[in-house]
Amino acid sequence: MFSEKANKIFKETISKYHEVGTVDQEFTNPFDQKTSLIEHLLYRKCWIDTVQWDYEDLIRDPEIPPADALILKRKIDASNQDRTDTVEFIDSYFLEQYKEVVPHANATINTESPAWAVDRLSILNLKIFHMEKEANRRDASTAHQKKCADKLKILLEQRRDLSLALDQLLSDIEEGNKYMKTYKQMKMYNDDELNPVLRAKKK
C-alpha cells in the first residue's frame, strides 16, 4: 500500500531531523531523484514540514527581536512556497502514473488530489511525533501527560483513517472509478505583478 511506504518514510525523515534538531542543519536526501522519484519527493516533503514546525515554534517566542522575527517570517514564506511546489511535484508523479487509465463514464472527482492528502499525512506524522513526546515528558504533570496521551490516541486513529482513505483514492483512480485533476495554487502575494505592494515597488 502506498500509505505504508509514505508513513515509513515520514517517520524516518522526522527521526533523522531530530538527531540534530536544528532548523539550519544540512539537508541530504537519501533517495535518488532519478531511480526513486516518489521516495525522494516524500522525504523532501516531510523534511520541509519538519523544519517549518520548528520555524513556527520559534516565531511564537514573545521575546523574539523584531528583526529576527522578520527574517524568520521570510523563511516561513519561502518554506510554504517550497511545500506547495513539492506537493505539485507529487501530483505530477501521480498524473504520470495513471495517464493511461481511462476513467469510467460515471467516474467522479475527489475533493482533493492525492498529493494534498499526502501533505496532510506528513503533517499528521509530525503531530504524532510531538504529541508522543509530550505524553512522555517527565517534567510535565500527570494531568498533562494523560491529556496528551488521549490526544495521541485520536491522532493515531486519524492516521489510520487518512492512510486508508488515501489508498482507497489511489485504487479508485487506478481502476477508473475516480479521476484526478490538479490546479496550480496560483498564489498572488508572491507575484510582483499580482501583489499591489510588490507591483508599486517596481515603479
Image: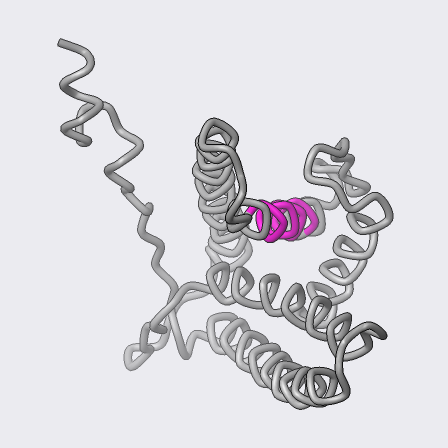
Quarter of the figure that contains the N terminus: bottom right
Q: Looking at the image, which residue is at 26% across and 36% down?
A: 189
Give coordinates of residue 15: x percent, y percent. Answer: 82, 56
What is the chief secondary structure element of the magenta stretch? helix
Task: Residue at 74%, 35% (x, y): give it.
Answer: 27
Q: Nearer the viewer, residue 106 or 29?
A: 29
| Above-or-below relation of 99 to 72 | below
The colour scheme applied to this rendered structure is one colour
Residue displayed at 58% across by 83% down: 158
* Residue 10 against residue 51 in the figure, above or below: below
For the image, the number of numbered tags is 0
Q: Position of residue 4 (x, y in %)?
A: 73, 72
Q: Is residue 24 magenta?
A: no
Position of residue 101 in the picture relative to residue 5 (left or right): left
Q: Quadrant of the C terminus?
A: top left
- Residue 53 lies, with reference to residue 171, above or below; the image says above
Quadrant in the picture for residue 138: bottom right
Q: Nearer the viewer, residue 107 or 45?
A: 45
* 154 w.r.t. 136: above or below: below
Read off the magenta span: 43-55
Say which of 83 and 62 sits in front: 62
Q: Residue furthest top?
A: 203
Residue 12, how many percent across, how many down? Answer: 81, 57
| Residue 177, horizontal then vertical, whole percent | 41, 79
Q: Is residue 54 magenta?
A: yes
